[in-house]
Every structure is written in C-alpha cells, then in structure tokens.
Amino acid sequence: MTEVNGQWYIFYHRQTNLQKCCRQGCVEKLTALSDGSILQAELTSCGLNDGPLSGTGIYEARIACNLGCREPHFAYVKVRHREKTHPYFTQSGMDREDKPDQYIANMQDGAWAGFKYFSFDGENHISVRVRGTGKGKLKVATSLNGESVAVITVEESNEWQVYDAKM
C-alpha cells in the first residue's frame, strides 16, 4: 500500500499458470476517510482506469477479478492431486513476449469468471473468443447469481473461435 500525490493505492497479485511463483501484478485505488482510516479495497477489472471500463471494445480474459467453480477448493490444492476442477489464468506464449496469449483455462460446468466494472451504454451484443474441448452455453449476467442478459452457445474447437449473442 502506498500514497502517491494524496491518493492511496494497494498493489497485489493474482496467481497464474498453476504455479506458486507465477503472478499477475494488479493495483486498485483506495479510499481514505477523514478519520485516517482506509476502506477495504474492492478487486475490480478496472485497475487505474478511473471508473468503469467501456462496454465497447476488446478486453483480455486476464482482467477477470474473480474465478470460481462449484468445488469449494482452491486451484493449488487440486493441482497437487493432478485434478483440475478450478478455472485458472494461463498463457500459451512465454513471459515477456510482445503479446503472450493469456486466457482462462479449465472453464467447465458450474465455473464462472467475474469482471467488474463495465459501463454499457446502448450496446446490444457481446462476443467471446474461446477454444477447447468443451461445448455448451456461457451465461452472461450482471451479478453472480443474477438473471442472464445473454447466453452464448460455444462448440468444441482446437482453434480460437468468436461467438456472440444479443443482450
């Protein structure tokens, strides 16, 4: 945690590549109160964007601020047993390449990825770029257990495919 020009920030990391030593650096602004206390940080996808991300544009999966599944275990616990039931961040390219191919792996029935916050102003469709051995439906909602605002049907493919749906 540090203060820069009167604004407080918290720096933290997210585990990647199912390795204890692999991390993705992140930062969030903090709110300092007049009594000197600091409110707990909220993990978001925004970083230092100064507000919600625009609902128009292309965003990498690595900005997801929450990953989860039906299983209550953490990814590193399952990896010890060579079971992979939890989604995780990984990449196909090497670190420090111009554009490593970062993505969320092991999305399966009951898994979810949370992104906070986006501002939708008239957008009427959403697209995802996926590949993998699974097929099914990706439900897009504005809260973890909320109503779906879009449902995207995906098919098995070894190549990256783009799918979209109306919102």
Image (cartoon, helix red, strand yellow):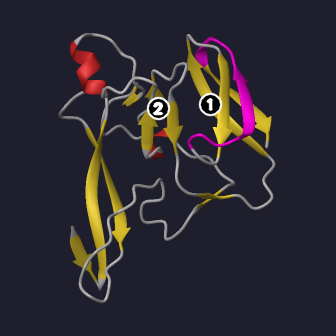
Q: How far across and how far down the image is residue 99, in percent?
A: 43, 39
Amino acid type at image mark 2: Tyr
Image quarter (top left, top right, bottom left or bottom right) of the C terminus: top right
Asked where in the image residue 79 lies, by quadrant, the reply is top left
126 horizontally vs 158: left or right: right
User: Which residue bears the numbered disc 2?
Assistant: 103
User: Which residue bears the numbered disc 1?
Assistant: 129
Q: Is residue 50 visible?
A: yes
Q: Is residue 18 visible?
A: no
Asked if the stretch drawn in magenta spans residue 149, the answer is: yes
Q: How far across and how far down the image is residue 53, in percent?
A: 58, 60
Q: Would you place residue 116 above or below residue 137 in this image?
A: below
Q: Which residue shows up at 45% across the image and 21% down it?
A: 106
Q: Are marks 1 and 2 in contact (CB under 8 Å)?
A: no
Distance in Å between CA atoms under marks 1 and 2:
10 Å
77 horizontally vs 109: left or right: left
Residue segment shown in magenta: 144-159
The crowd level at tag 2 (other Cα within 10 Å; few <14, some 14-19, many 20+) is many
- Which of the two discs, 1 and 2, labels the residue nearer the N terminus? 2
Q: Main secondary structure of the magenta part?
A: strand
Q: How far across and how far down the image is residue 25, in percent?
A: 29, 50
